[in-house]
Image: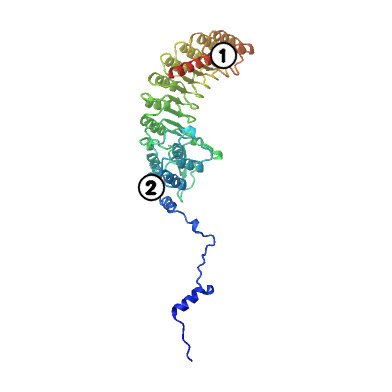
Amino acid sequence: MMAVSAPLPVLQRNAAGDPRRMRRIITEDYGWSLTLVPPLTDLCLRHIVHNYEHNPILEKLLPKHRSKVLDGLSTSLPLSVTANLITHEDYWRRCCTERWPTCDVSCYGFSWKRLFFERHLENLIENFIPDLTDTRTICNLAELSKRYIHSLKIQQLLPPVKVETRREDDDVSDSGSDAGVDFPSMDHFDLNLIAGPLCDLEELHLVYGVKGCGMNFEWNLFRFTDRDCTTLANALKTFRNLKVFRLHRSKVDDNKVRILIRSLLDHPSLVELDLSHNQISDRGARAVGKLLNQSRLQTLNLCNNNIRPPGAQAIAHALTTNSCLQVLNLRLNHIGDEGGQVLCNALQQNCSLEKLHIGSNKLSEPTATALAQVFSQNTSLKSLNISCNPIGLDGGKQLLEGISDNKTILEFDLRLTDVGQESEFYMNQVLRGNQERARVQTQQKRVSTSGLER
């Protein structure tokens, strides 16, 4: 008897009904779940982040999507891409905190973007080696960041690297000369390379020297050359919006300061000049006096130079007609009683100076006598420092007599002047009375101002 096979649909039904013969699909990722599949929006945002360098899309996104893209962007993206396209402070805050452990954004107008670009350019300039480092990197950065840089504080400027070149057939000369050694020029970074893009710079601090040189110390590392002076003077003419200029610890002598002053005589916006810790003497002080007559300087710092009585006389002569200068620092010079008396005579005519520092200038009783007259006549001076001068007991009595009728002086530094405890005590009593009177006047002005605003 011949067997009859079952129809094909019946076999399929039997196979489907037998769970042992069913096909099973097992995922290779045991943690996979349909709930873990990211939304299409997140996938698109990830794509934008990964391809931002080649296709920067940000401003066209919704605010919530834009914040996600900014959080995902790498801080190592080229500045040519991010400088003018990313304005959000959160991104630049990440760039700053990842690079520098200490970031005080309050010193940069509370702008993280300004902090980043100013410190980045400062680092490039401080590590620039003339004749070795490519200038294009700094020039390109200056062009990119010109809208965000308002201040540059350069703590060091490196000189060129000394290179020794000798021929194989040359021996050391009998005279012991350095004929086989090639000494390059000691000129530093030329600020004119970035002066054009940064013409709106408002503050510039410079030190022509090397910090942390250690055992590699050489005096050549601290030279402000003639060419450095000429190029800096030209750059100052370009920085027409410069308000603060500081050049200290750079061995600036009389000849160089005269060149720099010449470029600042007609400067329209300079209000603060700091030439402290240099080698300026009387000829340089005369140039500074000329600047006081033709500028709008409010603060002048000539601390720790070589200014003597003739230089003090030049500055005093300028003070008799000047009506802008508010702060003058002549600490650690050599003006002596001759220079001190001339300055005091000028203060009897000056009505703008509020703060004067003439500490450590070899002043004694004659200057104290002249200062007593200043206290009785001058009504603008609020702070005076004559510390570290041998004023003596008689000089202290003269100062006490003069300050007793003064109503405006609020700070008077008498440390290490040997004026005597009694005189110093009564002068402090006068100061406390003046300070209390100034506090009451300030409070009354605030009340009256708030009343007018209402």
Q: Nearer the viewer, residue 380 or 308?
A: 380
- Vertical placement of residue 304 versus 97, above or below: above
Q: Tell me if residue 127 can be seen.
A: no
Indicate which disc residue 57 carries: 2
Residue occupying the point 38% across, 25% down? 269
Q: Residue placed farthest to the right in the image?
A: 421
Whether 443 is drawn above or below 84: the answer is above
Residue 286 to residue 405: above or below = below
Q: Position of residue 281 (x, y in %)?
A: 47, 22
Q: Secondary structure at mark 2?
A: loop
Give the residue at mark 1: 431
Q: Residue 444: percent from the left, percent from the top?
A: 50, 15
Whether pointer 1 and pointer 2 mark residues with C-beta atoms closer than 8 Å, the reply is no
Mark 1 to mark 2 CA distance (whole Å): 63 Å
Colouring = rainbow
* Numbered disc total: 2
Q: Crowding at label 2, few (<14), some or many (≥20) Cα neighbours within 10 Å?
A: some
**Residue 130 visible in the shown view:** yes
**Badge 1 element:** helix
Count neighbours of disc 1 (C-alpha within 10 A) and say few if under 14, some if 14 to 19, many if 20 or more: many
Query: Who is closer to the viewer here, 100 or 255?
Result: 100
**Disc marking residue 289:** none
Type of the residue with mark 2: Ile
Q: Residue at position x 61%, y 11% from top?
A: 426
Identify which residue, 154 or 18, lies in the foreground.
18
The quadrant of the rendering that contains the C terminus is: top left
